[in-house]
Amino acid sequence: MASQGQVIFWSMTTVIIILAAVTALIIGFGVSGKRSISVTVLTSPGNIGQRGVLGCTFEPDIQIGSIAIRWAKAGVAGLVHEFKGGKDHLQEQDASFQGRTAVFADQVMGGNASLELRDVQVSDAGTYQCSVTTARGSGAAVLRYRTGAFSTPKVHVENSSSGDTLQCEAPRWFPRPAVHWTVYSDAGEYLPHFANTSYELNAENITLKVVSFLHNITANATYTCVIENNIAKATGNIKVTDFSITRRSSLQLVNQNTESVSSSLPASHWMLLLPLYLLSI
Ligand SMILES: *[C@@H]1O[C@H](CO)[C@@H](O)[C@H](O)[C@H]1NC(C)=O
Ligand SMILES: *[C@@H]1O[C@H](CO)[C@@H](O)[C@H](O)[C@H]1NC(C)=O
Ligand SMILES: *[C@@H]1O[C@H](CO)[C@@H](O)[C@H](O)[C@H]1NC(C)=O
Ligand SMILES: *[C@@H]1O[C@H](CO)[C@@H](O)[C@H](O)[C@H]1NC(C)=O
Ligand SMILES: *[C@@H]1O[C@H](CO)[C@@H](O)[C@H](O)[C@H]1NC(C)=O
Ligand SMILES: *[C@@H]1O[C@H](CO)[C@@H](O)[C@H](O)[C@H]1NC(C)=O
């Protein structure tokens, strides 16, 4: 009876050792038989009609010939872009991305798998996967790309019969943004004000030109025009004194990202404000 107990003990130990070894193999080399490498993504919203970058990095590998980068988009049959053996492979590229994509070939060896996307369209918004294979292994990460239009406003003083007026104008926004003004006296006092805003559809029928007027301005105050939608926030600032007018403006992108470091880890979401300070005049 004692020897039977010993046999059960030893078989259980063997099973545990085998399970541990298999688990270590899966963790170490991935199910594909290769080790998994870390792949990280980061992006900021795309501005319609302009150039965008979908950021992706991986553990560098000096053997460029063994690096394969594959960008795919959820709901799109073909690939977005494929790069392997040191050059582009676009045979399987989806027609909607034709002539608009590139990777930074000279930076691939350093671990840069970012995708350049030219002439960004509203319909480019969606979920993208960046997959990378190197001699060390493979990995993938997913990001959510958002698109819209945003631009920095210009604020200037307009003469009108009913007192001086400020005009805040920004050429391209989408979706339709909200506009508000803040007015502070030099003493830091919040001043009441009256503004009216109009939106005009641009020739491509998507983006809007935004014009907002603030009536009856006075000297010795700072006026700020704030334009904001779900992807960006821009401000135009003007300080009026009896002798001078000082202007400043800025644009911030509201960046919502989905990042996963190698495909095995859970995705995490966060809000990130990426300030792009654009000084004007
Ligand atoms: C990759 O390289 C391009 C071109 O130099 C650069 O604009 C981009 O920021 C790089 N991406 C990352 C994630 O480093
Ligand atoms: C506003 O109008 C006055 C007189 O009509 C003129 O002297 C002044 O230069 C004008 N200012 C601007 C900013 O156009
Ligand atoms: C807004 O203000 C401008 C300038 O005073 C005026 O020409 C325009 O008619 C106003 N628009 C509205 C909708 O009140
Ligand atoms: C924009 O819309 C108008 C009216 O709906 C149409 O006549 C025009 O061709 C459109 N322009 C473009 C560039 O799609
Ligand atoms: C601006 O001030 C003038 C004179 O004080 C007044 O008649 C006019 O109604 C004011 N306009 C606005 C839009 O508040
Ligand atoms: C603005 O401030 C200057 C200097 O502090 C002062 O001389 C001037 O009277 C003020 N103007 C107004 C309209 O309050």
Image (spheres, grey):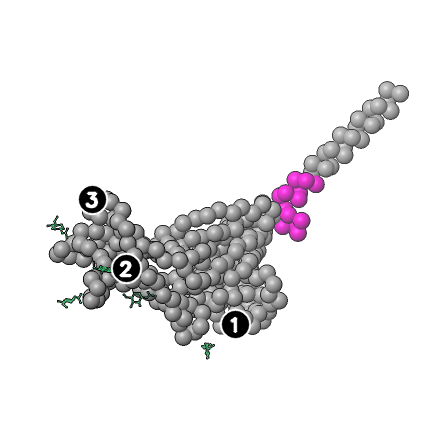
Q: Amino acid at mark 1?
A: Gln
In magenta segment, residue 30? yes
Q: Earlier in the sequence, mark 2 or mark 3?
A: 3
Q: Secondary structure at mark 1?
A: loop
Label 3 crowd bin: few (<14), some (14–19), many (20+), radius 10 Å? few
Tell me where the magenta segment starts and ends, as one range: 22-34
Q: Secondary structure at mark 3?
A: loop
Residue drawn 44% across and 72% down?
A: 205
| Between 65 and 161, the one nearer to me in the picture | 161
In magenta segment, residue 42? no
Give the number of the disc on residue 214.
2
The span from disc 1 to disc 3 (Cα, nearest Å) is 57 Å
Q: Is residue 89 visible?
A: yes
Residue underneath mark 3: 187
Q: Amino acid at mark 2?
A: Leu
Estimate the x, y position of residue 229 in percent, counting from the top left: 42, 57
Residue underneath mark 1: 98
- Figure quadrant of residue 280: bottom left
